[in-house]
Image (tube, grey):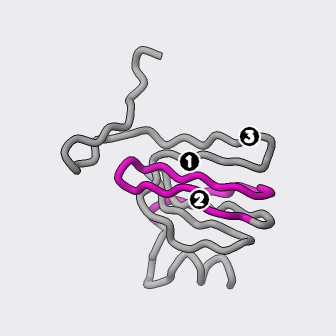
Amino acid sequence: MPNEKKAAVTFGQKVESRHKIIVDQRNEMLITGVIDVVSFDELSVIADTESGVVVIKGVNLHISNLNLDSGQLDIDGEINSIVYDTKNSYGKNGQSMLSKIFK
């Protein structure tokens, strides 16, 4: 893929990377382009990515690897859904993503 941008870290400075989600058999997930993990427990993981806020729901979810310098997040467990929200709506009007989800 000649035009694909790669994630790179140079002397502690993050270089632009692409957001990507790879799911293997609905029980392992790799996410790139992660800026921050907003919340997580065994039923959901909420992450802010370069493409917006993503909510992963499932059962027995565990974060097996998180590296915010490279923007990589690995999740294990039974993955039931992946839902995106736009970055513009994250924190809009003082509301957190969690308050919108559990409204």
Alpha carbon of mark 1 to alpha carbon of mark 3: how far? 12 Å
Question: Mark on residue 24?
Answer: 3
The segment highlighted magenta reads: 61-88
Q: Main secondary structure of the magenta part?
A: strand
Disc 2 vs disc 1: Cβ atoms closer than 8 Å? yes
Residue linked to disc 2: 54
Residue at image position (59%, 59%) is 54
User: Is 103 located above or below residue 90 in the figure?
Assistant: below
Seen as rendered, the residue at the extreme top is 2
Q: Give the mark toward the camera: 2 or 1.
A: 1
Residue linked to disc 1: 31
Residue at image position (38%, 39%) is 17
Q: Tag 2: residue type?
A: Val
User: Is 55 located above or below residue 16 in the figure?
Assistant: below
Figure quadrant of the C terminus: bottom right
| Residue 77 locus on image (x, y percent) | 76, 58
Q: Quadrant of residue 91?
A: bottom left
Mark toward the start of the polypeptide (2 vs 1): 1
